[in-house]
Amino acid sequence: MRRYLAARLFQAVGVVVFVTTFSFVLIHLAPGDPVAGALRGPNVSETVREQWRATYGLDRPLPEQYARWLLSTARGELGYSFSLHRPVRDVFLDALPNTLLLSGTALLLSFGLGMAVGVLQAERPRGARDRWMGRTLLVFFSVPDFWFALVILILFAYRLPWFPAGGLKDSFGYDYLPPLAKVRDRLWHLALPVFTLTVLTAANAARQQRAALIAVLPSDWMRTALAKGLSWRAAVRKHAFRNALLPTITLLGISVPQFAAGSIFVEKVFTWPGVGLLTVNAIGARDYPLVTSGVLVASIIVVCAALVADIAVAIADPRIRLS
Amino acid sequence: MAAHAGPLAATDARSVRRRLAGDTRVRIAIVVLTLLALSAAFASQISPYDPKEHLGITTLNGKPPSLAHPFGTDPFSRDVFSRLIHGTRVSLVIAFGAVALATTLGTVLGAIAGYVGGVVDSVIMRVVDAALAIPPLLLLIVVIALWGSIGIVPLALLIGNVQWFGTSRLVRAETVALRDTDFVVAARALGVPGPVILWRHVLPNAVGPAIVGAALAVGNIILLEAGLSYLGIGVPQPTPSWGNIIQDGSERVSDLWWLTLFPGLAILVTVFACNALGDALREALDPRQLQASPLEDTLHHSA
């Protein structure tokens, strides 16, 4: 098992190196330079631009810039956001808790929901319930993230004004609320974004869960369980379910990109001040350091999540653990 | 081809065709995709107005659906129905262009990696591993944000270039399984050159996963393009696409709900049809999925 983990870790490091190098190359292949973008307008003289280039090291040879960039990225210095006039790291650290709150809650709910639906479907593959659930899931699987979020927003924030149209908390009176009402206000603002992201991601989780269960149903140990007198339903829920949990762990790890993409749209539609909204606003402001570091950080999180999931599977699966 | 018992034992063409013919999902998909293809082909004949024309910037802006404008007008007084019909053409051209590119790249690279093996295999598959770590949406956001808005053809090429990774994995797995089967070994022993073996003997048997991958990729790409256009970095204005029609209404979503509703339904129906077709194809090509348990049919009645 130690050898497997070492190989897997080595691979993850390789991917991170590839991704960082690729981002650097991409940034430098792009037309235009960040200084010209940040210091627009006729009142800025070329001398000032040159000074800025020297300040940020943009006049050095490319390999030196790459080495410096790699070192500072490794230290967590991600550059300076031209549109927000703050270090990118600080901007991210402010936004990250909001994204983690939204995505984390949605992740738990969507996997709970997805696993329940997957079990209900796999109990009788091709049966009536499997079919209608499968079709419903396929609709949610096919719906554009941003459109579903917009529909929920129009229905439950504008037409039926039950929930706030966006934001993290009440923008006027929040600071003056008593503690319990503060919690209530936060949950009230969280409801629509979490619901949207949960429904969007649960469809995939359920489809995968169903497939994982159906894959283990023809196993010998299922026949044994049935032969010793267990009912079909009990055999599915006790034996097949546990054996299908391994792919679920892997799926948790590899569904992180889906959450990254989903939260970009959900955060934009509900103006939820997380990393996704930050990235979208940075595109509009042509704030390159913010966009590229946002994607870089997201990719590294994706790699780590897949790594953690594989380690968890290695620990949970005796076939790997004992090898 | 049917005589080769590849790793997917039940992929002989006749039984696949029989399974597909009886599938409701396939029929739905064919009807939807035919209607879409027709409206894309005859967009100019079907749409009552020029999709880019401002019909009356002060008198006809943001009007709700009516007889003259069944899907309403946008804030620039353009007819939404006409834009939607023309948007079909744009979305389908991008989707099928990108899928053709992605499937070709994925099949060729996956087959080479699987058949040649060794260093070539390692290099290709490590690149694929790394690329799969970056969500395609984020990758496209970076590229387009850095380069500024791009045209329809570069957009299709770009999307095609970030969608082949999954297909290459599937095709490689299938090729590796086929590499040491008797008929491939026999061809090699007869002195058939490598590229010919790949093309004539391996690829026809490994094409199943590529087809399933392509059907699912069409849906994915339509979603990607719509998402990028909604963020304002996809298809550039004034060319209509389903995503950028929704973006036109995004400042006043509640007032101008028709700008969100109709293009969104068009995307949903199209992607649903592609995904349903993909699911049906996967089940037809890999029937092991269906035979969940031979015991199950007899047992669940007593349960």
Image: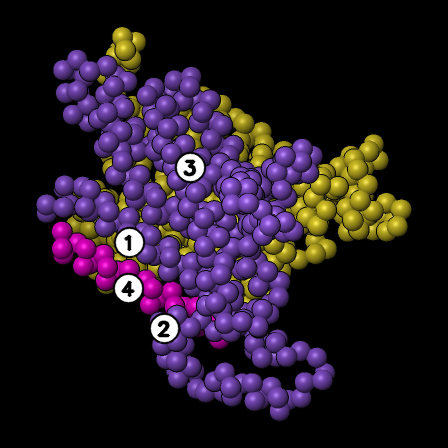
Chain colours: A purple, B yellow
Point out which mark residue A63 bears: none
Name which residue type carries label 2.
Answer: Arg
Q: Identify the residue position indicated by label 4 in the image.
A: A13
Distance Cα–Cα, label 4 vs label 3: 31 Å
| Eye-nearest disc, 4 or 3 | 3
The percent coordinates of residue A117 (x first, y second) are 39, 27
Q: Quadrant of residue A189?
A: top right
Span of residues in magenta: A1-29
Residue B40, quarter of the rendered image: top right
Q: Position of residue B124 (x, y in %)?
A: 31, 60
Residues at marks 2 and 1, CA–CA distance in whole angstroms: 21 Å
Instruction: Give residue A275's position: percent from left, percent from top.
Output: 50, 57
Residue A307 marker: 1
Residue type at mark 4 is Val
- At mark 2, the secondary structure is loop
- Identify which residue is drawn at 10% across, 45% down: A322
Mark 2 = which residue?
A75
Tag count: 4
Chain of the residue where label 1 is placed in the rendered structure: A
* Distance in Å between CA atoms under marks 4 and 2: 16 Å
The front one of A267 and B128 is A267
For image coordinates 46% across by 68% down, the residue present is: A89
What is the three-letter code of the residue carrying label 3?
Leu
On screen, A240 above or below A284? Answer: above
In the rendered image, the vertical position of residue A113 relative to residue A275, given as above or below = above
Question: Disc 3 designates what residue?
Answer: A109
| Dot 4 alpha-carbon crowd within 10 angstroms: few under 14, some 14 to 19, many 20 or more | some
Please, which residue is most extreme toward the top here? B302
